[in-house]
Image: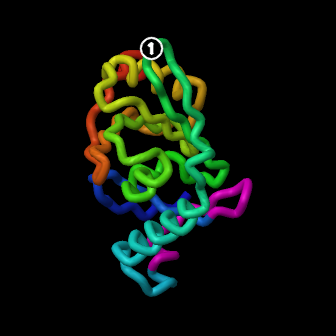
Amino acid sequence: MPPRVQAIVAPGVTIGFGIDFGPALLTVSPEIVERWSMSVADLAAHALANLHEVAGTVSPDEVHRGPLGDVDIAALQTRRGIGSVLVLAPTELARIFGPEPALFIAPMRDLLIGLPASADPSLAAWLYDDIASGDPNCLAPRAFLFNGRSITVEPLAVPLLAA
């Protein structure tokens, strides 16, 4: 496999790039970017524009809401492959999940789970671990704090994955 192109985008998340061919994903290499005659910054901007375009097709009705013990959670699996990367589009998060402050976790590529911003971080870590441990391609354990307008990235203490 050739090396993949990566960029750091707000809120400080490293992203890679790929071309989605349905069941397959072609990793974008530096050679591909060079052939396209664009910079990595241009590629990142294009990817974020694509994210916003696809996110615009997601309805707030697609969010599943319910209790987990005494905590209300909201979960979204878009079936468009963008659930987890919605943390890179806070305006779309506000439109889809609502503008209330929240703590999001993204244990899998197309899954985003929102908890109240005041939720116990150990609950978020447990929920992340419970889901991510069943996915060999799970995402990095991070929490995403949403204040209604922007995202900040926080560490997520997941003891089982750290061991």
In the structure shown, which secondary structural element does the residue marked by tag 1 occupy?
loop
Residue depicted at x 59% and y 31%: 135
95 vs 163: above or below: below
127 vs 85: above or below: above
117 vs 129: above or below: below
Magenta stretch: give its range: 20-33
47 vs 61: above or below: below
Give the x, y percent position of residue 118.
29, 26
Q: Is residue 42 visible?
A: yes
Identify the residue at the far top of this view.
Answer: 69
Residue depicted at x 50% and y 84%: 36
Give the x, y percent position of residue 17.
49, 62
Quarter of the view holding residue 58: bottom right
At label 1, counting other C-alpha atoms closer than 10 Å, the crowd grade (few under 14, some 14-19, many 20 or more) is: few
Q: Is residue 163 visible?
A: no
Q: Is residue 4 left or right of residue 109?
A: left
Which residue is the site of mark 1?
70
Q: Is residue 150 left or right of residue 133?
A: left
Residue depicted at x 31% and y 44%: 146
25 in the magenta segment? yes
